[in-house]
């Protein structure tokens, strides 16, 4: 190597993540990443591509200046709780963090918007992972899967899709910048609430390099055969093409419509309902074609049709135009924004007006002449990478500390949660006090206390003796009386909720954590939680993932994944480690006190909902830092009747919170049934109601029960309005 040249380092690279593999066809994410790779080769740029591994086998290979890393699903006890897409997101996050540890940080990392692929890397950066600080995390808005599902007409309130699509929306708010490809998509995403008020949005089109075989030679005489190269689905415009075929038939015009792409039930419906068009040869289905086969067909077409009512940046359109083949599109196709007005007059049509589209087809040679001067420079590798570099540089120049944590329902949260005057640390340097309610837990409490004392953050402990009656447990308390950093307080037996509230009332530190006397925490939990509370003034409490531990053999029985605490889904299904959250002390005292009338741990849940009702949202650290002991006969295992009774009390108590979220709750319950049927957002509802002592009739069917619950919710909301 010459002295004036150097090998590119990771700091010069943009890293790309794809849930489709490079060899994937069909004009989607795989096509985009292939085009980026070709663009990088053209301008001699080093990039890295992380893609999901074929057959679950990890590998890495160099292809010129491109490093391609195949990422398998990581082995984790959280696999079942996560579900497929969240598991894939975590796998990408861990692979990228390992790559940073080995090779150093990149210039930026770009994620696609689909399926919340970037969720866990975004979350890890936001909660303070040092390896990601200073690395811009970009989101490219190709088209969110939730938007596509809506266009298709598929409801997405059933788990796990409901959570995947909600996480997808959160990623838009969490990214350091969102790259939008068209004004159409930018406006649509804003309308649907994908952007936060401070989201940095950057407009840039994707790169495109035509294949050497892509040019379509001019012919003196062409048949009037037009093609559609897309999935055979309604949202891609299949009904409009069938309508055009009917119009050509009505006018007795010699136009043939050739279709290629994957068939779907939408196509099969039209094949049956319009069989005469297929039998007569007016419409011909060619099957799925390879790249070379498609180019051969395009050489025979007068034009191509891309009639989807809305489309962001379809590569199939760019391929046609760059090859000199006219492609008719709608005004809400993103490509219409980057072509000349002269060309737009010839190829932008209203597919709902079949006669006018037929007229355009009959005069398509006018568009072909204009295409001879079609300018591809906007899609060039130089334009693409210059735009990315410009964005990354602007992010570096405008670098500022993010004070607001991104929440999906930020309009229900509030900022300014930090105390105006920070309470001083205690003599031991503690800013956090851990309150441990204690009733006959002498056998377990030493392990609990030692886990707190081993914390990497300075902590103090208030051990609230809730009138213990067991002699050995009472004697055990003597081990802690007078100990540094531990206060033992005695109260008459009044229940765990009263004991917790009493303990918190004695706290004089800025932060307080709750912990059961038989549970434990990992050493870094409190330090990481305090960092989040110090960083964001709109976060009221912090939790983490949870290990459920068997009291019999100390094995992990469940690895429980938790997500940031907002009203939904938490008012229907608890999704926090509410037994061991870390709070801002004064906010707990104002909004989070536990209700002694609630049993079966729902007092914890209700206290967390009180925080949410007060606009104090929570952040969950994406790792298991809390260990919950499951004991035979514990309050957690006391049965369904207690659950239903206490949940009913919560709904009546928190009516204003339910009222604000009533439409979403109704739709969620209608799709998933009673909240006894699901406990993990990554898994579908069980779809049945085991051990339900229900009256005869409608309540035996879960969807009818859901409908009944939804009606009750609306009645509660009506009461709240009055």
Image (cartoon, rainbow, N blue to C red):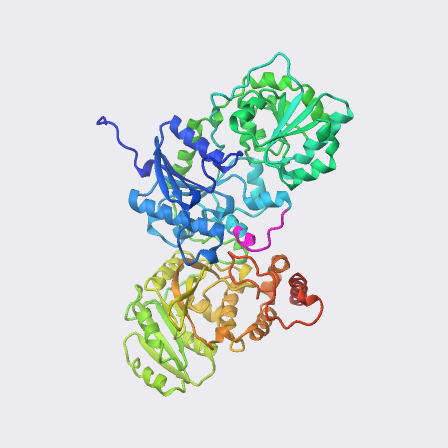
Left or right of residue 352: residue 218: left
User: At x 62% / y 23%, what residue is drawn?
Assistant: 303
Q: Picture coordinates of residue 113 (x, y %)?
A: 50, 43
**What span is in magenta?**
154-164
In which image quadrant can residue 239 be found?
A: top right
| Quadrant of the snapshot with the N terminus | top left
Is 158 in the magenta?
Answer: yes
Is residue 98 shown above or below 705? above
Let me know if residue 338 appears in the view: no
**Could you say which is closer to the camera, residue 554 or residue 603?**
554
**Could you say which is closer to the camera, residue 278 or residue 434?**
278
Kindly give the residue lying farthest to the left in the view shown: 3
Is 220 in the magenta?
Answer: no
Give the prevailing secondary structure in the magenta stretch. Answer: loop
In which image quadrant can residue 255 be found?
A: top right
Let me know if residue 513 appears in the view: yes
């Amino acid at each position: 190597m010459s002295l004036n040249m150097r090998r590119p380092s990771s700091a010069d690279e943009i890293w790309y993540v794809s849930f489709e593999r490079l060899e994937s066809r069909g004009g989607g994410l795989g096509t985009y990443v292939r085009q980026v790779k070709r663009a990088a080769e053209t301008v001699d740029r080093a990039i890295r591509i992380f893609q999901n591994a074929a057959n679950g086998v990890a590998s890495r290979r160099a292809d010129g200046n491109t490093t391609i890393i195949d990422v398998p699903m990581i082995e984790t006890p959280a696999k079942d709780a996560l579900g497929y897409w969240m598991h894939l997101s975590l796998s990408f996050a861990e692979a990228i963090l390992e790559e940073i540890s080995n090779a150093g940080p990149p210039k930026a990392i770009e994620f696609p918007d689909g399926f919340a692929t970037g969720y866990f890397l975004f979350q890890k950066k936001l909660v303070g992972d040092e390896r990601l600080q200073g690395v811009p995390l970009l989101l490219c808005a190709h088209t969110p899967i939730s938007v596509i599902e809506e266009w298709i007409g598929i409801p997405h309130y059933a788990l796990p899709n409901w959570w995947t699509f909600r996480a997808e929306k959160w990623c838009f708010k969490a990214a350091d910048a969102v790259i939008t490809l068209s004004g159409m998509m930018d406006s649509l995403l804003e309308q649907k609430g994908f952007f936060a008020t401070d989201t940095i949005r950057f407009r840039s089109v994707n790169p495109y390099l035509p294949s050497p075989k892509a040019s379509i030679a001019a012919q003196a005489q062409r048949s009037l055969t037009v093609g559609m190269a897309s999935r055979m689905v309604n949202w891609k415009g299949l009904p409009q093409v069938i309508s055009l075929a009917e119009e050509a038939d009505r006018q007795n015009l010699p136009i043939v419509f050739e279709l290629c792409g994957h068939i779907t039930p939408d196509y099969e419906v039209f094949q049956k309902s319009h069989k005469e068009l297929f039998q007569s040869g007016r419409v011909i289905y060619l099957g799925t074609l390879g790249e070379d086969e498609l180019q051969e067909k395009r050489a025979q077409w007068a034009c191509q049709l891309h009639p989807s009512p809305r489309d962001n940046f379809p590569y199939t359109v760019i391929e046609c135009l760059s090859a000199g083949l006219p492609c008719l599109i709608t005004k809400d196709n993103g490509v219409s924004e980057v072509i000349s007005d002269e060309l737009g007059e010839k190829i932008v049509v209203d597919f709902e007006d079949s006669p006018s589209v037929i007229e355009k087809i009959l005069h398509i040679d006018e568009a072909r002449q204009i295409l001879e001067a079609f300018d591809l420079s906007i899609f060039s590798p130089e334009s693409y990478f210059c735009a990315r570099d410009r964005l990354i540089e602007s992010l570096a120049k405008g670098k500022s500390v993010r004070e607001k944590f991104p929440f999906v329902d930020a309009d229900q949260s509030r900022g300014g949660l930090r105390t105006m005057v920070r309470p001083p640390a205690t003599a031991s340097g503690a800013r956090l006090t851990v309150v441990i309610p204690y009733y006959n837990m002498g056998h377990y409490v030493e392990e609990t206390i030692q886990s707190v004392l081993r914390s990497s953050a300075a902590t103090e402990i208030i051990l609230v003796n809730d009138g213990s009656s067991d002699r050995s447990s009472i004697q055990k308390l003597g081990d802690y009386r007078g100990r540094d950093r531990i206060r033992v307080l005695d109260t008459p037996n009044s229940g765990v909720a009263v004991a917790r509230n009493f303990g918190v009332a004695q706290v004089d530190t800025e932060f307080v954590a709750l912990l059961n006397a038989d549970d434990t925490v990992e050493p870094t939990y409190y330090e990481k939680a305090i960092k989040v509370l110090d960083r964001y003034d709109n976060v009221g409490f912090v939790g983490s993932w949870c290990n459920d531990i068997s009291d019999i053999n100390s094995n992990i029985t469940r690895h429980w994944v938790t997500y940031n605490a907002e009203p939904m889904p938490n008012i229907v299904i608890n999704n926090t480690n509410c037994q061991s959250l870390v709070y801002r002390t004064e906010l707990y005292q104002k909004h989070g006190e536990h209700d002694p009338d609630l049993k079966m741990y729902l007092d914890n849940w209700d206290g967390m909902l009180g925080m949410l009702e007060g606009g104090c949202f929570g952040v969950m650290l994406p790792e298991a830092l809390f260990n919950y002991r499951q004991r035979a006969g514990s309050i957690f295992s006391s049965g369904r009747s207690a659950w239903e009774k206490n949940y009913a009390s919560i709904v009546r108590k928190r009516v204003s919170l339910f009222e604000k979220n009533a439409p979403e709750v109704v739709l969620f319950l209608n799709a998933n049934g009673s909240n006894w049927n699901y406990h993990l957002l990554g898994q579908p509802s069980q779809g049945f109601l085991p051990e339900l002592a229900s009256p005869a009739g409608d309540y035996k069917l879960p969807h009818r029960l859901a409908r009944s619950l939804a009606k009750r919710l609306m009645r509660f909301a009506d009461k709240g309005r009055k």
